[in-house]
Image: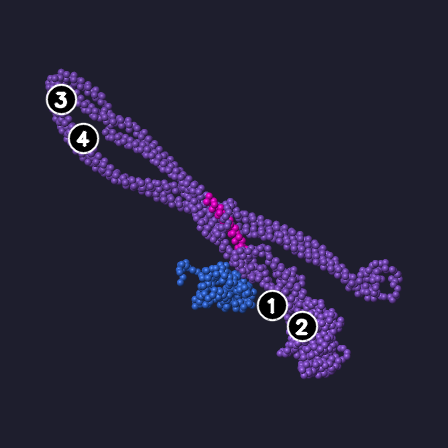
Chain colours: A purple, B blue
Amino acid sequence: MRYLNKIIFINSASIKYSEIGIDGNVHFIGTQGVGKSTILRALLFFYNANQLRVGIPVGKKSFVDFYLPFQNSYVIYEVIRESGPFCVLVFKSQGRVCFRFFDTTYDKKYFIDSEGKAFESWDKTKLAFGRDINYTRRIDSYEDYRNILYGNSKGITSEFRKYAILESKQYQNIPRTIQNVFLNSKLDAEFIKDTIIKSLNEEDIKIDLTNYSHHLKGFETQLSDIKKWTEKNKSGEVIVRKQADIVATTYSAIKHLEREKKQLAMQLVWALNNIEKQQPKIVEKLEREESKRNKLNEKASEIEKTFDKKKEKIQSQISVFKSKISEANAKAKEYEQINIESIIQRVAKKSDLEGERQNLLEERELLSAKFTEINQRYEAQLKQIENQLQQFENSKQTEKLIARENLQLFKENLTKQYEKLFEEIKKQHREELQLAKNLLEEKKTAISNLHIKKAEIRHKRFYETEIEEVKNEIVNRNESIRKSDNDIKQFGEQVKTIQKHWDLEKVRIEEIFENKKGKCSEQINKLNNEITSINEKIENSKDSLYGWLNEQYPGWEKTIGKVIDEENILFKQGLSPERISRSDLSFYGICLDLNEISKTVKTVSDYENDKTELNGQIETIQKNISELLEHLNNDLEKLKRKHQPKINEIKDDIRNSEYTRDQSKSKLEEAKVKLNDFTNKAESEKKLVLEDIETEIQKASEGIFNAESEVIEIEKSINKQVELKRKEKERKAEAEQQKTSDIAAKIDFEIQNKKQDSQKRTDAVKAQQQRELSDKGADVTRITDIEKRVADINYELHFIENNRDKVAEYNKDKRELFDKIDEFKSKKDLFEQQLETELTKHNLQKQKLFDEIGLLNTEIEAIKKELDNIGIDLKEFESFKLTDCYKSIEELTKELQEENKTDKRCKSLIEELNQSYYKGIDRYRELQEAINKFNGNFSSQNIFNFKTNLIEKAEYFKFAEDLKEFIDEDKVSDFERRVNERFAHIIKQIGKETTDLLSKEGEIQKVITDINKDFIARNFVGVIKSIELRIVSSVNKVVQILIEIKKFNDENINDLGTANLFSSPDQEAKNKKAVELLKQLVKEISDFKEKEITLSDSFELQFRIVENDNDTNWVEKLSNVGSDGTDVLVKAMINIMLLNVFKEGASKRFRDFRLHCMMDEIGKLHPNNVKGILEFANSRNILLINSSPTTYNATDYRYTYLLAKNTENVTTIKRLVKKGAEV
Amino acid sequence: MQIPKQTAEIFEILSRGQFICSNSSDDSVCKLYGIIDESFGELYDYFASINFILERGDEYFYFSRVESKVDLERKIETAFKWIDIIDFLKTFDSSFGSGYRFTPSDILVKLNMDAELKTKLDGLRKHSGGKDKFNEIIDKILELLEKDKFIELENEISHLYKVLASFKYLEQLVLTIDIPEEVKNEIPE
């Protein structure tokens, strides 16, 4: 039995020295202010070691100042213990209360010297202790002190363990209860509850809310974050997924653009390099072609020249023949006019006539030969006349000649004069004519140029490069579409193959698992069967022979047990065994030595053991199954990790291909439209240009016509003028001619007259001659006839003579002209034909040349264009170099790779680069927008750890990349699963902990029932009708929720965790409930002040005290009950009761101790009640220490001390009564 | 006509000229958005009968009303203010839009590097009610934006703001401004 035995004051609380025994009920008496309460407080201090809770009123001296005023002030408590007493020394050190324990009975000599003076230092006490007495170091913490005193072994070293009054970890309520009794504190259900709980178990059961609030932190947002991936809007779309898709698409577009840009950049490098290489070559080629063209041009002009010459020649020939023909015609006309035929005939008669004349002359001669003389005379006369005539004629002829000469001269002069005039006229118009001719020539060249151009255009293909490019593009795009399609198909196949592999492997693994699991389940079933049979046996054991034997026949195992059939007999019911009181150990009259049989019968505990073993086996197998399951999950996870990246990669490729395909398709469409455009444009443009040229040619032809007519006009005017002048000249010449003719005519007339004269004279002469002759007989008639005939002939001959030249001329003309006229004509035709042929030939040649030149021109033009393009390209590149776009690809332009060969021009490449650069910027902006929009759905503490504050481009890209991966690998489901598992786990955990918590309810109820019964049984106070406690369910919201969750967990213990919190439709309601509960829990936890839920939170305690007619009803707190006295009494009763409850429960290992309760001013109570309460306390191993001014019933106490003060205000304590016996 | 039970709540928000956005961090607002989204037709008719036109924007809802001519001038003044503010914010970051997150200090940092931004902020002084320091002007502007529910304070500790879907409304406002060709080259007064 341990208890506080004695308290010793040395120089403390106005007491010099006093030893007060308290090993029983104690009553302090004395007048007011002598120190009764002081002593009670000092006793309380032993139990609660709390300076502030010993009831010292505010404003009074503090504990340390009052109880330990001096260095040598001590309060010593002696505690009895089964192994001998120990003491607790309370002293002051550095102004603080300190403790020491020492392991011996109290002896005055340890602290007081021989002179009665208290030791001032520990050294002296130590010395006084000597060697054998153990003492502890100084303890300056109240907590440590209490731990030591109440035996809370946790946190104190073993040297202190022996100084314990009890052994409890949950002792805290003991000092508090004692304190409550002393201070008459109000009743608080909370405290009572706490006391009861602590008495139940040393370990306080509690639920750590911080744990849950930590795990449930952001629970709602996490949940809603995940839900966002499955929640559909009105139109059935999951907005977040759609937005994520946009991000992914935009990102792949950017990626694609990057790639495109890279490729373009590389191509640009190649193209630049190419054009730099090509440029000199092209220049050379241009020069070559140009020289070729020049040569052709020269050739053309040469041909023109030769042709002109030839043409001239032929034309001159033609004109020659023409003139000859016309001459012949003119002459023929002329000859016709003079009737050349008759002339010829007359001339042809010349010789005939001459012959006739000769004949006639001879005849005449013959006839006149005789008359010669006469004839001669007459002849002379005639001669003379003739001579005279001749002379006259001659003179006149000379005159005529002179006139004629003059005419000739005049004519010559006139001609000369007019020749000059003509020349002048021609000169006047020459320039004009030349101008006109030049113009004509120019026009002709222009038209020939136009013809060249036409030929050129006819050969030129418009938009050739563009069309070619577009065609190439179409081919390329088609190719890329085909390739992409192939790729997509192929990739799809690959994905399918991988998926199939995956599925196969999965099925295989799952089959293996199922097999193993099946085996395990079989085993479990088997074991379960065994357990059931054992259970049956145990169950039946009571009613069976076995039970009976156990009950009625100890030691049966050694006898009947060795021979009995366990299955059929031992556990069979209804055998109604009966013991026959025969003491010999016979077995149906046979005696066996059973020592030889080693069989042992299994007892119930053996069966229990077997069962436990079987259960253990089942557990092992179950563990195996769960291991297998884990293994399976791991394997599946591994599989996923093995195949998923591949699939992702391929899917990525598919997406790329799809993008390329789509892009190509749109580009293809574009190109087709472009091609169509270009073709149409080329055709229409060609047509237009040709038409233009045609009109130009027409215009030029008209111009030529105009020019020609002008030339002709000019020539005509010249001719006209010349003609005028010529006419004038002719008129003048005619006049002169007339004049001359007149003169000639006059002369001729004169000559004619003369001739007539002469003729007359001749005729006269002749007539005379005739007469004379006739006179002389001559045949005159004949002669006259002859003469007449001769004269005729002479005339005719004369005519012939005159016309003989003409005939000769005619003959010559005939020979040279008339006979050849057909030849001339044919020759002329020939030449004309030749000219025609030459012209066609020439034209053909010319056309050919023109065509050639045209071709060359087109080529040159093309080359020039190419050169121009190169120039433009280079210029374009130079300006491109300054752009941001170039800077972004500068890195890529370093290396040249032949594989980047391209037909595109630098310009278009740059355009495309720019396009993709700006597109890239646009896309990046779109990506930013899309990501921001997407991120807007999630808070910055989202469960997926999406970074919500993105700044750098790289961050955006990284985000997009991660998001893509997130979607591809369907990480949402991982999160879903994880969150699901976590919350299921939380719910289970809550269920478990709450169950634990609530499991104590029964025990608490029992304690309370006991207390209630006790009150009824031991109520010694008449006025108090009842004191009652009860448990009501907790009003703590957190606890309520926890209970709800527990219920939910109990109902759905198999559904959670495995099923899905978020998707499965039949679970919907349950999941919602679970979520709702957890949400509420989070809310309540945040509202709840404490960090944990203790057992005391799990229920509420109420009490009800009925005193006379006053019913407190069920309350949780009670400040007072009835009047002062009743109040003290009731509270004391309850507290003592509690102390007892606690005492019973708190120190489980060691219960053999006593405690004290202090009650001041006990005089308030009726002596009967004092006695009652003393008994009440004592019966619970609790001693009471009371104080009051006077004593009432001294026999109720073991000690009665009288306190008094002397004049020096020193308290003296005298023991008045001591009852011999202990309580 | 079955109208949702949150109609009063919706009306309270919208009638103050505020927006209900789908990406609000406030769960209740999100829920309201969902409710309006679901029963838009009914709500539209319902509010139309009390002369409020429920308008659907891109992920946000708001009320509009037939304007009297007298109010127009004041409205245009307000529009000017918003245009200036958008101009400033877009200069700050071209991707400033729905879902964008930022802190005032982000703007201040950028301000030190971007003279144009500084000029534009200077121009916003007139809307800031006599505030002089840059950070005060920014705070004032953010306050304006927040008051009309274009942005919201997502994190009070780090002062992180989130741009709401309703910001699109301001962007639309700018886009609907039609500048006729002949006025384009005029020098503004």
Horizontally, residue A246 falls left or right of residue A121, namely: left
Point out the frontmost of discs 1 and 4.
1
Q: Amino acid at mark 4?
A: Glu
**Residue at the outermost top position:** A370
Label 2 resides on the chain identified as A
Residue where numbered disc 1 is placed: A1086
Residue where numbered disc 4 is placed: A405
Residue where numbered disc 3 is placed: A383
Residue where numbered disc 2 is placed: A98
Main SS, magenta residues: helix
Label 4 resides on the chain identified as A
Task: Give the residue at x 28% y 40%.
Answer: A433
Q: Amino acid at mark 1?
A: Ser
- Indicate which disc, 2 or 3, sits on the residue closer to the N terminus: 2
- Indicate which disc, 3 or 1, sits on the residue closer to the N terminus: 3
Point out the frontmost of discs 2 and 4.
2
Residue A475 appears in the rendering: no
Point out the frontmost of discs 2 and 3.
2
Report how far apart the C-alphas of labels 1 and 2 lie in the structure: 42 Å
Residue A958 appears in the rendering: yes
Q: In which quadrant of the rendered view does residue A1142 lie?
A: bottom right
Q: Which residues are magenta?
A: A248-277
Q: Are marks 2 and 4 on the same chain?
A: yes
Task: Give the residue at x 55% y 57%.
Answer: A959
Point out the frontmost of discs 1 and 2.
2
Label 4 sits on a secondary structure element that is helix
Question: Is residue A1090 highlighted in magenta?
Answer: no
- Indicate which disc, 2 or 4, sits on the residue closer to the N terminus: 2
* Residues packed near mark 1 inside 10 Å, few (<14), some (14 to 19) or many (20 plus): some
Give residue A940's position: percent from left, percent from top. Answer: 56, 62
Q: Amino acid at mark 3?
A: Lys
Give residue A854's position: percent from left, percent from top. Answer: 40, 41
